Image (tube, rainbow, N blue to C red):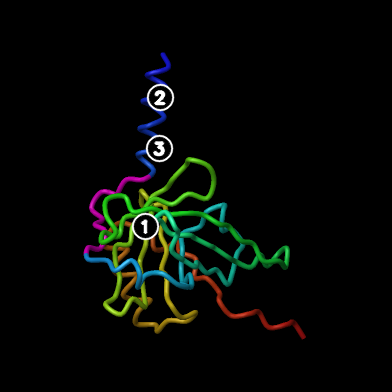
């Protein structure tokens, strides 16, 4: 019985670090160039980011060969910053844009970089399925043409673009 439970748990965990069907991670990734701060331009909604604006992710090297992850966002309702620290590791090798990331315990989820511009300024990222999607940028604001490119690409890949949240990055102006 325990073997069946362990096998089922293993399959469940492995499923969360897999690739969505039809989505290929970028090849020839330079992990060192990917490190640093990224701003969240758009995302699909999830409870762990619900209500957050000014969201960013910062990646730095770990001594064990992995990557430290620091996600940060402003909770407008609470009027307070929220942060989450995690760790990420490459699933196959450090030149393939497929990582597994964990924010608690032994549980990992996929982080699939499926588009990355040549200058490492913009990235489109998925989870293990089409319920997870992020548009990341090195700058808090992006040109409208790039937003349209993102929308076209994710629509072609089967994501629900109508459910996207365009993340405010600017500090709100006080009401008069």
Residue under label 2, please give it.
Answer: 6
Tell me the tag on residue 126.
Answer: 1
Residue under label 3, please give it.
Answer: 13
Q: Nearer the viewer, residue 138 or 129?
A: 138
Earlier-in-chain disc, 2 versus 3? 2
Asked if residue 31 is positioned above or below residue 104 in the image, the reply reads below
The alpha-carbon separation of the residues under discs 2 and 3 comes to 10 Å
Q: Is residue 167 left or right of residue 75?
A: left
* Residue 23 within the segment the image draws in magenta: yes
Provide the major secondary structure of the magenta segment.
loop
Asked if residue 99 is positioned above or below residue 167 in the image, the reply reads above
Where in the figure is residue 159, as x and y percent of width and height? 35, 58
Whether pointer 3 and pointer 1 mark residues with C-beta atoms closer than 8 Å, the reply is no
Earlier-in-chain disc, 3 versus 1? 3
The alpha-carbon separation of the residues under discs 2 and 1 comes to 27 Å
Where in the figure is residue 107, as x and y percent of width and height? 47, 42
Residue at the extreme front: 63
Q: Nearer the viewer, mark 2 or mark 1?
A: 2
Q: Nearer the viewer, mark 3 or mark 1?
A: 3
Where in the figure is residue 130, as x and y percent of width and height? 36, 52
Where in the figure is residue 169, as x and y percent of width and height? 55, 76
Identify the magenta region.
Answer: 17-27
The residue sitting at 42% across, 54% down in the picture is 64
Quadrant containing the C terminus in the rendered view: bottom right
Query: Which SS class for mark 1?
Result: strand
């Amino acid at each position: 019985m325990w073997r069946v439970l362990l096998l089922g748990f293993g399959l469940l965990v492995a499923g969360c670090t897999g690739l969505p069907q039809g989505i290929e991670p970028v090849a020839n990734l330079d992990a060192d160039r990917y490190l640093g701060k990224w701003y969240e331009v758009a995302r699909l909604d999830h409870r762990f980011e619900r209500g957050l604006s000014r969201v960013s992710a910062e990646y730095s090297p770990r001594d064990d060969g992995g990557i430290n992850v620091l996600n940060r966002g402003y909770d407008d309702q609470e009027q307070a910053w929220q942060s989450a620290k995690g760790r990420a590791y490459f699933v196959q090798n450090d030149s393939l844009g497929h990582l597994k990331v964990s924010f608690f315990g032994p549980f990992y989820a996929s982080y699939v970089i499926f588009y990355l511009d040549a200058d490492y300024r913009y990235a489109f990222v998925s989870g293990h399925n089409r319920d997870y999607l992020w548009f990341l940028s090195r700058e808090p604001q992006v040109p409208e043409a790039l937003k349209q490119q993102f929308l076209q690409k994710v629509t072609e890949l089967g994501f629900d673009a109508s459910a996207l949240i365009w993340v405010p990055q600017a500090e709100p102006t006080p009401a008069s």
